[in-house]
Image (tube, rainbow, N blue to C red):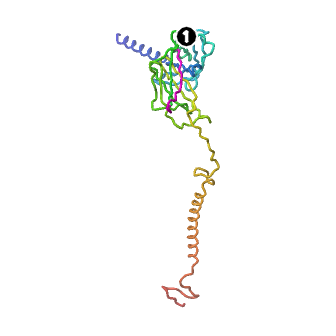
């Protein structure tokens, strides 16, 4: 009797575990980042991933609401829907500018509810107000780029020490570092400086302008900051269109004349030898035999017998 009771309890326990495993909802993970460009444009990026079967997969068409400081309708930044990569972004509207300038730090709140099979997920990101400045210096032929990072505290902007800053030149698809260092760390004045070592860099226009870029990436306190500055430190290269001119990289009939002469001479010589050999073979077949038989003769080993 006791054995039956124990077996029944074990079966109930296994059944309960199986049902709870089937009802377990997939875990939703939200990543929130704040970006500031040129100390004016601010926007938020959201990345949504779903943890299922011990794997992280991007979540498409997820509706996410973003708030500033509190979950009230007046503090709503906007509502976005993620793309195929599980990502989405929205700018912070100008209507919240007054609220933004009140305190030195703010909290961004992302709220997502994917559906009936998953619970509502909330992610928060606290960011301190900061700005970044970019300047240049040309002394005795040595060109330098100077970046400064400031944070807002007690109604004024104060230098921020120990912030990693990247300085480079904006190029297609990314940025090119100006010197040997990949990143620079701000000193007690909130400043970093790097020598510009890119000589004869192709410029973006005829005036030799290039775009310098300083940025702080994924900082725990300030988020992502970036600023650009245009300087005439490049060199303009006039593009020469060589299409249709004779060159080694041109089409067949636009190759150099000496190359065409060499190629056609080789082809002509090869085919000339082949044709010469065919003519010789044809002539050999037309040659007469060494001896001609007369009517009524039978040729046997070089002698003839008259029948």
User: Where is residue 42 drawn, in percent x and y?
Assistant: 58, 19
- Residue 231 visible somewhere in the drawing: yes
**Residue farthest to the right?**
244
Residue 28 in view (yes/no): no
**Depth check: 189 or 252 in front?**
189
Predominant secondary structure, magenta span:
strand
Q: Quadrant of residue 265?
A: bottom right
At x 41%, y 13%, the residue is 13
Query: How many marks do you count on the picture?
Result: 1
Q: Is residue 246 above or below residue 34?
A: below
- x, y (%) of residue 254? 63, 53
Question: Which quadrant is the C terminus positioned in?
Answer: bottom right
Q: Along the line of sight, which residue is nearer the eye, 274 or 253?
A: 253
Q: Is residue 19 covered in magenta?
A: no
Label 1: which residue?
A: 69
Q: Quadrant of the N terminus?
A: top left
As drawn, the residue found furthest toward the front would be 140
254 vs 294: above or below: above
Instruction: Find out whether residue 137 is within the magenta segment.
Output: yes
Q: Residue at x 59, y 64 (%)?
A: 268
Element type at marker 1? loop
Magenta segment, which residues? 128-142
Of residues 89 and 285, which is closer to you in this image? 89
Where residue 256 appears, x then y in whole percent?
60, 55
Q: Position of residue 41 (x, y in %)?
A: 59, 20
């Amino acid at each position: 009797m006791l054995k039956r009771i124990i077996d029944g309890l074990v079966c109930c326990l296994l059944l309960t575990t199986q049902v709870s495993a089937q009802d377990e909802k997939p875990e939703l993970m939200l990543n929130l980042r704040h970006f500031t460009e040129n100390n004016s444009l601010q926007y938020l990026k959201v990345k949504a991933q779903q943890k299922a079967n011990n794997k992280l997969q991007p979540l498409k068409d997820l509706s996410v609401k973003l708030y500033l400081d509190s979950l009230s309708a007046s503090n709503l930044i906007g509502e976005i829907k993620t793309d195929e990569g599980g990502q989405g972004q929205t700018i912070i509207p100008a209507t919240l500018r007054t609220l933004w300038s009140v305190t030195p730090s703010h909290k961004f709140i992302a709220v997502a509810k994917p559906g009936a099979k998953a619970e509502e997920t909330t992610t928060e990101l606290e960011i301190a107000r900061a700005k970044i400045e970019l300047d240049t210096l040309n002394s005795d032929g040595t060109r330098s780029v100077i970046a400064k990072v400031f944070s807002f505290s007690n109604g004024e902007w104060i230098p921020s020490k120990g912030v990693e800053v990247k300085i480079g030149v904006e190029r297609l698809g990314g940025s090119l570092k100006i010197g040997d260092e990949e990143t620079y760390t701000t000193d007690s004045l909130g400043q970093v400086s790097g020598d510009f070592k890119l000589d004869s860099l192709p410029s973006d226009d005829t005036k030799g302008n290039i775009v310098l870029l300083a940025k702080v990436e994924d900082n725990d306190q300030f988020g992502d900051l970036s600023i650009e500055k245009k300087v005439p430190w490049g060199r303009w290269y006039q593009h020469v269109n060589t299409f249709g001119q004779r060159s080694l990289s041109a089409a067949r009939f636009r190759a150099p004349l000496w190359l065409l002469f060499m190629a056609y001479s080789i082809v002509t010589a090869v085919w000339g030898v082949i044709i010469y050999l065919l003519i010789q073979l044809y002539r050999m077949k037309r040659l007469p035999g060494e001896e001609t038989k007369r009517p009524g003769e039978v040729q046997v080993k070089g002698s003839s017998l008259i029948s």
